[in-house]
Amino acid sequence: MHTLLINMDYGSLLVPSVMVAEVLPVKVIYDADSPRHWVLGRIHWRALSISVISFERLVSNLRPTRDNYSRVAVFYPLAGHRQDDYFGVLTTQDPRSLLVSEDLATCAIPDNVTGRYIASATEVHGRVATIPDVDALATAIY
């Protein structure tokens, strides 16, 4: 299976590459009046205004860092949502493309991560990568 290993301040997120539409450099994230502490703001992308979230803040107490290496991974709308319901996730650098087997061995979810939005964790190239619970993520984002 083709995946993307997305680097975050808390560790790594592993997602099927078909979930990600594009990876962009962070230019300007416009402030958004959101009561959700993990919504960083909005960006303009392909004639759309999309929310950018911090997965770190969603699953841990960490605040994401932004620097010249930061990127926004633009995710396609999750199943059951409008075709224009894209959202972005702030990353610490460009995601890494990986080919992994379908039967990944699971390991313990890192202690610094709460499990509500995490389906499981696996070890990839000596690093623990978390796999998001897409259904729970959809309820949080939409």
Image (cartoon, rainbow, N blue to C red):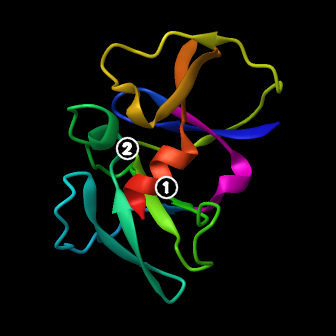
Quick one: 141 or 110, which is closer to the camera?
141
x and y, in percent, of residue 28 in the image: 29, 71
| Bounds of the magenta segment | 13-22
The residue identified by callout 2 is: 55
For the question of whether residue 104 can be seen, the reply is yes
Rendered image: mark on residue 29: none
Quick one: 59 or 23, which is closer to the camera?
59
Considering the image in quadrants, where does the N terminus appear? top right
Q: Residue at x 63, y 13 (%)?
A: 106
Residue 23, by quadrant, is bottom right
In the picture, measured across the screen, residue 112 lies left or right of residue 23, that is left
In the picture, measured across the screen, residue 67 lies left or right of residue 79, that is left
Considering the image in quadrants, where does the C terminus appear? bottom left
For the question of whether residue 71 can be seen, the reply is no
The secondary structure type at the circle numbered 1 is helix
Q: Residue at x 56, y 46 (%)?
A: 134
* Position of 132 relative to 100 (above/below): below
* Position of 125 relative to 100 (above/below): above
Instruction: Check disc 2: other Cα within 10 Å, few if <14, some if 14-19, many if 20+.
Output: many
Q: Residue at x 38, y 54 (%)?
A: 140
Instruction: Check disc 1: other Cα within 10 Å, few if <14, some if 14-19, many if 20+.
Output: some
* Position of 76 relative to 130 (above/below): below
Q: Residue at x 65, y 61 (%)?
A: 79
The residue identified by callout 1 is: 138
Kindly report the distance in space between the C-alpha atoms of the residues bearing marks 1 and 2.
Answer: 13 Å
Residue 18 part of the magenta-drawn span = yes
x and y, in percent, of residue 93 in the image: 46, 44
* Position of 80 relative to 82 (above/below): above
